[in-house]
């Protein structure tokens, strides 16, 4: 077996591995177990008991297969007492349940689900998360430093520390805790690697990037961007299919927790929203219905009383993707409208200024949190209303638009104010309740005062809330035409332009220079969406200065930066397979390992840019969650195909395509941004040679276009309003 195959079992394109491939991999593990068993007989008859035990511990540590490792350790635990001394046997008895929980967690959870037991089955991490987060006492209970079991214990200890560090903000965002977790994890990984040099997982954890198997070969007829995008999409598709086949339970769970499991759609978006894979669609529906059928969601929103970042995800990250995937099913609209009913009865009200706002950071389906010091509306509350905002965008229903615009008008007016020292025009991160004041008295306009909560920075400017609210205001402008909703974005753009002209200096927190220096984090995405939506090019200089490679392509048709970025994401997805699959212990961190593990960061491996992949295949210059402007859904699998949407306007759509297969490929695309009307369409080669053309009338109900692309010829499809 090749070294790469020990890291990533052979997985065919479009699947998580065929049944025969999965059986073959298990058989190889079974064969190794049999050989080890034979080796045990040899040891028992021709070597000392200590040597035999040490060899079996080494075999358990050197394998990359958790089932094989567990088999070795169970065999040791069941051996004659002479093979292990009493202290080592006791240490093995202590560690074995941890190894069993790692290797057999899904099987046990499946049994619980079949018996109807439990509402949530956190089988990937429930057995170590809390104990590891506490850090002390040490978990798992350590054996003696001289014990033969110590390196194996160190392997598990290091993995627990690593994934809790990647997952938990109280570690990741607290420097002294992060340093402690990483330092101990590195010590343990190094020790385990010295003991088990054949273990490929340990090579990755100690800083090697090992290639995954079955990488797509480049095609010299294809443009560079297409080769890189194809590889990235193929690998991402494999990872998604692996999670469906190897992790999802029959009730929809993926083994993290519901609030994390439902977040997975965000990085699935390039495939889930950009393409049409029945297996992935069905998995998303199974997850959504499983989540919403829980007693905890019976009220239409979670019964858990905690902060909005956590409560919002269980509905927002369920209802939003299902509107994309199955928006014609009225079930999702009905569930979405329930959010506005809850807002009217529980969550928001008129503040002291007579303006509508949310009353608290903490709430559930029936009440607000008790802590008056946490009484804020924030940009994170956009996520609560994310499904309603999308439904309003799709239907233009005034019953949705009236309350949403009243709430967003509160924020637009706050953005244009200079309340609490905020520069005029800047969209804030939080508003106090009931005063309506921007920010807090303790921290000024930049955010709420949350009494040492590690989440405080997440709710503060210029983090996600300010960007999300700016995008929501842009959406309100697009749907109502009212200029007050877009005025803050235009004011921020002018402020940024003046600041760049002054050399882009930084300044003390809260000052205008400090804010202007950080404005790209808040305004780049909404400004790109504004550019796409209106064609207004007056801020192209800012976008070229600050925005990403797709926006540069959109403005100047230069593919060089985009090609480099696609190559970087393809590179990261093409190595270290276990760190996206078998090793992942938290389902909201599936693509996070290259971003957060220091030794992998030190290799220069880039982060996985799933947003860029989504953007290239849909034409939406930003994340999918807020005010999505995805112009295309390709009704085909994302295999042997590269697509790059280059124009995505209300009256024109264009995309470049390259089909890597050997035969002509017939396909459909839904054109989601084009306004209803009469259009002409054509498919032509990159040099302009006509291949096919026609006319179509687009309606809200019928947005599909059918056409064919040739084999291994660079071509493009263009749809434009009929003259």
Image (cartoon, rainbow, N blue to C red):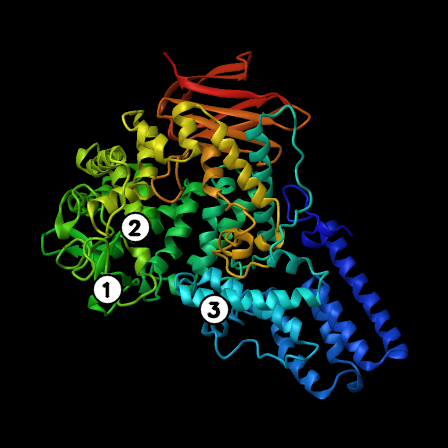
Give the distance between the C-alpha atoms of the residues marked 2 and 1, in whole angstroms: 16 Å
Specify the farthest residue to the bottom. 86
Residue 107 showing in the rendered view: no
Query: Is 300 above or below relative to 414?
Result: below
Q: Point out the frontmost of discs 3 and 1.
A: 3
| Residue linked to disc 1 | 374
Q: Are marks 2 and 1 in contact (CB under 8 Å)?
A: no
Give the distance between the C-alpha atoms of the residues marked 3 and 2, in whole angstroms: 30 Å
**Which is more toward the observer, 247 or 621?**
621
Mark positioned earlier in the residue sequence (2 or 1): 1
The answer to whether 46 appears left or right of 660 in the picture is: right
Q: Position of residue 519 (x, y in %)?
A: 28, 42
The answer to whether 389 appears left or right of 208 in the picture is: left
Element type where label 3 sits in the image? helix
Mark positioned earlier in the residue sequence (3 or 1): 3
Q: Are there few (<14), some (14-19), or many (20+) residues within 10 Å of tag 3?
A: some
Q: Point out the frontmost of discs 3 and 2.
A: 3
Query: Is 340 above or below relative to 149?
Result: above
Mark positioned earlier in the residue sequence (3 or 2): 3
| Residue linked to disc 2 | 465
Q: Which mark is residue 180?
A: 3
Q: Are there few (<14), some (14-19), or many (20+) residues within 10 Å of tag 1?
A: some
Quadrant housing the C terminus: top left
Within the image, what quadrant is residue 524 found in?
Answer: top left
Residue at image point 64% right, 60% down:
202
Query: Is 530 above or below relative to 19?
Result: above
Q: Are marks 3 and 1 in contact (CB under 8 Å)?
A: no
Give the distance between the C-alpha atoms of the residues marked 3 and 1, in whole angstroms: 30 Å
**Which is more toward the observer, 411 or 569?**
569
**Which is more toward the observer, 378 or 545?**
545
């Amino acid at each position: 077996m090749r070294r790469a195959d020990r890291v990533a079992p052979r997985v065919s394109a479009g699947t998580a591995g065929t049944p025969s491939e999965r059986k073959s991999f298990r058989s190889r593990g079974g064969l190794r177990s049999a050989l080890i068993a034979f080796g045990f007989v040899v040891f028992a008859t021709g070597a000392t008991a200590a040597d035999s035990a040490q060899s079996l511990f080494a075999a358990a540590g050197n394998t990359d297969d958790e089932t094989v490792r567990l088999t070795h350790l169970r065999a040791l635990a069941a051996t004659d007492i002479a093979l292990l001394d009493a202290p080592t046997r006791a240490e093995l008895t202590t560690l074995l349940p941890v190894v069993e929980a790692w290797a057999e967690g899904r099987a046990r959870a499946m049994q619980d689900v079949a018996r109807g037991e439990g509402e949530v089955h956190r089988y990937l991490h429930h057995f170590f998360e809390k104990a590891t987060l506490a850090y002390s006492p040490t978990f798992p209970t350590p054996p003696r430093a001289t014990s033969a079991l110590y390196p194996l214990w160190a392997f598990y200890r290091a993995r627990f520390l690593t994934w809790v560090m990647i997952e938990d903000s109280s570690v990741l965002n607290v420097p002294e805790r992060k340093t402690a977790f990483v330092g101990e994890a590195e010590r343990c990984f190094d020790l385990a690697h010295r003991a088990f040099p054949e273990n490929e997982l340990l090579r990755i954890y100690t800083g090697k990037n090992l290639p995954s198997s079955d990488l797509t070969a480049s095609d010299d007829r294809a443009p560079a961007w297409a080769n890189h995008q194809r590889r990235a999409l193929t690998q991402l598709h494999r990872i998604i299919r692996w999670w469906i086949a190897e992790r999802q339970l029959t009730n929809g769970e993926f083994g993290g927790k519901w609030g994390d499991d439902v977040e997975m759609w965000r990085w699935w978006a390039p495939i889930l929203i950009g393409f049409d894979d029945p297996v992935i669609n069905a998995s998303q529906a199974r997850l959504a219905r499983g989540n919403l059928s829980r007693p905890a969601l019976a009220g239409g929103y979670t019964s858990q009383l905690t902060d909005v970042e956590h409560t919002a995800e269980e509905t927002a990250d369920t209802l939003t993707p299902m509107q994309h995937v199955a928006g014609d099913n009225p079930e999702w609209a009905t569930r979405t409208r329930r959010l506005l009913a809850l807002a009217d009865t529980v969550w928001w009200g008129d503040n002291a200024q007579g303006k509508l706002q949310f009353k608290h950071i903490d709430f559930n389906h029936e009440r607000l949190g008790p802590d008056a010091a946490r009484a804020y509306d924030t940009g994170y509350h956009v996520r609560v209303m994310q499904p309603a905002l999308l439904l309003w965008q799709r239907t233009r229903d005034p019953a949705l638009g009236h309350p949403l615009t009243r709430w967003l008008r509160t924020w637009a007016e706050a953005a244009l104010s200079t309340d609490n020292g905020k520069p005029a025009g800047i969209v804030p991160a939080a508003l106090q309740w009931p005063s309506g004041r921007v920010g807090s008295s303790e921290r000024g306009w930049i955010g709420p005062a949350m009494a040492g909560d590690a989440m405080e920075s997440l709710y503060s400017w210029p983090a996600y809330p300010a960007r999300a609210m700016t995008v929501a205001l842009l959406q309100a402008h697009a749907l109502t035409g009212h200029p007050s909703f877009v005025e803050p974005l235009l004011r921020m753009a002018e402020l940024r332009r003046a600041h760049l002209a002054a050399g882009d200096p930084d300044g003390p927190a809260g000052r205008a220079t400090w804010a202007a220096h950080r404005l790209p984090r808040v305004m780049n995405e909404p400004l790109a969406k504004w550019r796409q939506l209106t064609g207004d090019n007056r801020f192209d200089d800012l976008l070229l200065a600050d925005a990403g490679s797709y926006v540069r392509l959109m403005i100047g048709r230069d593919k060089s930066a985009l090609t480099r970025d696609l190559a970087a994401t393809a590179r990261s997805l093409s190595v270290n397979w276990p760190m996206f699959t078998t090793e992942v212990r938290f389902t909201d961190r599936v693509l996070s390992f290259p971003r957060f593990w220091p030794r992998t960061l030190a290799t220069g491996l880039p982060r996985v840019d799933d947003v860029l992949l989504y953007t290239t295949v849909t034409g939406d210059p930003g994340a999918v969650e807020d005010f999505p402007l995805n112009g295309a859904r390709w009704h085909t699998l994302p295999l042997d195909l590269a697509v790059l949407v280059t124009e995505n306007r209300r009256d024109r759509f264009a995309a470049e395509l390259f089909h890597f297969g050997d035969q002509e490929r017939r396909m459909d695309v839904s054109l989601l941004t084009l306004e209803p009307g009469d259009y002409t369409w054509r498919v032509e080669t990159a040099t302009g040679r006509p291949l096919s053309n026609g006319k179509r009338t687009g309606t809200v109900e019928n947005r599909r276009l059918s056409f064919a692309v040739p084999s291994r010829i660079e071509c493009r499809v263009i749809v434009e309003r009929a003259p």
